[in-house]
Amino acid sequence: MMPAKEARSRKGLAESFIGRDIVSMRDLSTEQVLFILDLAEEYEEMNEPLLKGRILANLFFEPSTRTRLSFQAAMGRLGGSCIGFADASNSSVSKGESLADTIRVVENYCDIIVIRHKFEGAARLAADYSARPVLNAGDGTNQHPTQTLLDLFTIRKIHGRIDDLRVAFLGDLRYGRTVHSLIETLARFECQFVLVSPPQLRLPSEILDDLAALGVRCREEFDPSILPRDVDILYTTRIQKERFPDPIDYERVKNAFKLDREALSIYDKTVTVMHPLPRVNEISTDLDDYEGAAYFKQAKNGITVRKTLLSILLGAAQ
Ligand code: NCD
């Protein structure tokens, strides 16, 4: 039996999520982030019908495999159901309906909304219009908080902690939203960063300025073919083709780097190789059975973390 004080704080923390939106990692205190990770440990094998009769609306205005299907699977595992669309061209948006109107209608059909959109700020707008909780499943180049939580969950499972780690971010640091939300969260946990990208894809200056203001140790390297040696984790990303205003600029950087067994032979220890997926050609399939390969584990952990989030936002957590 848990001591009364601990039990109260757990109850209090669980209640702090009820009806909330998660649009950005900045919506969550460090205490709340850790609470989600702890609860997710308990939810990994838990498939009770906590969300029986509840409905999730998946509004995907951009392509998705993992995020949309794992929300759907998480809801199903907990006894709830899903409505929504995976392609906005099938929705009334193609007739000219505004996002605000779509949200005002859909909130009547569901208990919680998950939205992915190509515009930064779209999820915040949806949250402003919706009386139901809104979860941001990626808004343009801005944020992808549920991916960050599953990334943190994966890191903690492998390394036993999320603090004091040396993390290299590789690839498209300019447009990759998974990097933007993860780096600012890991910065709260005294991690150090190496940022490896072609110069045109470096981390946006606003984020670099925020990291500098926090006194976070951060080094930039502009030759992606040279891997930094002093790291625990290589967080690799896809070059975000769809975000480039000029396709010629994409052509210049599309093959900027590739991780394979040979590239990792410089390490005399196992490094954790992460990627939010989908990969194109950044990670060779010859790494798939490498001990540190964590990308399919991340995808698997997505269900656990999303079961946890849906339960706490809907006030059904046990
Ligand atoms: C990412 C995304 O949509 O930002 N995918 C995902 O959710 N796992 C990464 C990407 O598309 O490259």
Image (cartoon, grey):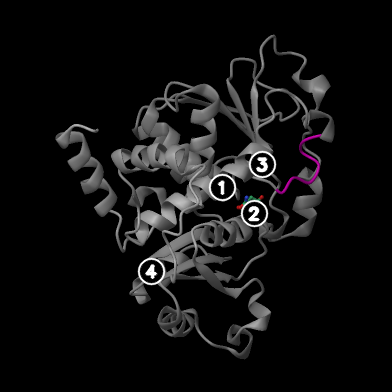
x, y percent for residue 26: 36, 48
**Which numbered disc covers residue 302?**
1
Q: Residues within 10 Å of mark 1 (few under 14, many from 20)?
A: many
| Residue under the point 77% across and 43% down | 253
Circle 4: residue type: Ala
Q: Is residue 98 above or below residue 283?
A: below
Q: Cβ of disc 3 within 8 Å of ligand 1?
A: yes
Which element carries disc 4, helix, strand or loop? helix
- Please, what secondary structure does the residue beneath circle 3 have? loop
Quarter in which the N terminus is drawn: top left
Magenta region's main secondary structure? loop
Does mark 2's beta carbon lie closer than 8 Å to ligand 1?
Answer: yes
Question: Of label 4 and label 3, which has the lower sequence position?
Answer: 4
Q: Earlier in the sequence, mark 1 or mark 3?
A: 3
Q: Gap in Å between the C-alphas at discs 2 and 1?
A: 8 Å
Asked if labels 2 and 3 touch by Cβ distance under 8 angstroms, the answer is: no
Q: Nearer the viewer, mark 3 or mark 2?
A: 2
Lower sequence index among marks 4 and 2: 2
Front residue of 86 and 14? 14
Element under disc 1: helix
Element at label 2: helix
Residue for badge 2: 66
The residue tagged 3 is: 237
